[in-house]
Image (cartoon, rainbow, N blue to C red):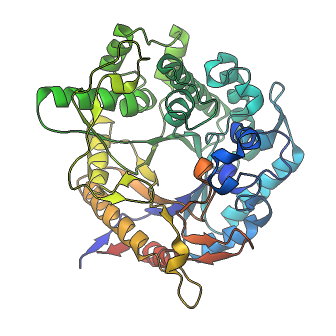
Amino acid sequence: MAKYKFPENFTWGAATSGPQTEGWTDKKNFSIYDYWFQIEPEKFHNGVGPEINCDTYRKYKEDVELMKEIGLTSFRTSIQWTRLIKDFDTCEVDPVAVEFYNNYINEIIEAGIEPYINLFHFDMPIELQNRGGWENKEVIDLYVKYATKCFELFGDRVKKWCTFNEPIVPAEGGYLYKFMYPNIVDFKRAIQVGYNTIVAHSKAVEAFRKLNTGGEITIVLNLTPSYPRSQDEKDLEASRIADGIFNRSFLDPVVHGTFPSDLVELLKENNLMPEYTEEELEVIKNNPIDFLGVNYYQPRRVKAKETEVDVNAPIMPETFFDYYDMPGKRMNPYRGWEIAPQVMYDVAVNIKDNYNNIPWYISENGMGVEGEERFRDENGVINDDYRIDFVKEHLTYLHKGIQEGSNCFGYHLWTFIDCWSWANSFKNRYGFVALDLESGKRTVKKSGRWIKEVSETNEIEY
């Protein structure tokens, strides 16, 4: 068993979001998820929606106390646009919501934990979705107004801001693969949504810097590194295309200020280019992020196109490649995701070599498991050794990347407390802390005790 020491001031934390923890108590507006649950509750696991969730809105003090107890030094959550803002056009705030977020942020800081505050976590207001959502450039301006209001209200204390969590997901889920409202299938519209989100991000970064409240700003991207089936030229090309669509499409503009030329060519050749202006491209170019948040869960394995393309079917990302089911891969059977901790090293090296070695951190990584109550011992503690081993293994590869010079400064588990996972509801559990849905009782898992030791010693043994 070896010891892996992490850099001084390395931050150990966890991430979650407002819509997945707070519940909708006292909210003046509904998000697309609030609305979708109301009209189609059967689409959500066991019919459990976002109305209560973890009830963090009422139990935030208890939650922060537990964060401190398990040794977290940083914590990411999000402000709900639909909670903070009463009127989206005027950006009038709800004073009750302002009080809640002030109290929550203050509680986190007083516990010695640094808050990382995100502004958008899949929770488009339904009122604005009905106006076109991210397809509508007016919504960009309303988002920037909202972001600016957040910087003004909380920027005296919050010094780590995030514009978006996984901005590709609303494009994928809402406009390609039908796992998010409005459940449309249209690649060109998905690209417009993705592009407009990048413009909104860049304009929010610009607004943040104009206010000069201090601190730093980022975006959190879910990177799914693409691996080819083989070193055959056609497999390599398939991997490059997938990487361009799903990774570099966001990574390049937020770090380098430009879009990948090969991706732009692909979009032009297939009549998929979004509507854009030169002014927007200038804003993107002039507002790079200060640091990067990376959510890593699984790789993407692809091969050259072998299935015949249906010329009458709508064009999709998979028009250009096929997925490759690699023999012998390790899987998390509950989530259907490949477990590939070695990819953490590849992510670290890629950022070092191709993205200016920008300061970055793992903003999410974790393991969702169904039926965790079967691992509960006589003291009521869930012995989630599988989660500890999962995290340790990923951290050894992250450590290797850091040793080779990658500028990674922290690790956040998804998540602090078992939370509501969109249409999957509470099916799979991810947290350091277990949540009893009936009583609302919180119980620290074995992994929560373990992360406290890691945080205190700044090292792991594996």
Q: Is residue 159 visible?
A: no
Residue in view at x 73 percent, y 20 percent: 131
Q: How many marks?
A: 0
Q: Is residue 276 left or right of residue 108?
A: left
The front one of 360 and 224 is: 224
Q: Looking at the image, is 13 positioned above or below residue 286?
A: below
Q: Looking at the image, is 169 positioned above or below residue 191?
A: below
How far across and how far down the image is residue 178, in percent? 54, 33
Q: Is residue 301 left or right of residue 42?
A: left
Residue in view at x 30 percent, y 23 percent: 320
Q: Quadrant of the C terminus?
A: bottom left
Residue that sits furthest to the right in the current view: 95
How far across and how far down the image is residue 458, in percent? 40, 71
Residue 328: image quadrant is bottom left
Q: Is residue 232 visible?
A: yes
The front one of 207 and 21 is: 21
The front one of 343 and 461 is: 343
How far across and how far down the image is residue 44, in percent? 64, 49
The front one of 331 and 247 is: 331
Q: Quadrant of the N terminus?
A: bottom left
Q: Looking at the image, is 421 positioned above or below residue 178?
A: below
Residue that sits furthest to the bottom in the current view: 378
Residue 56: image quadrant is bottom right
Q: Is residue 385 left or right of residue 169?
A: left
How far across and how far down the image is residue 279, in percent? 55, 11
Residue in view at x 29 percent, y 43 percent: 352
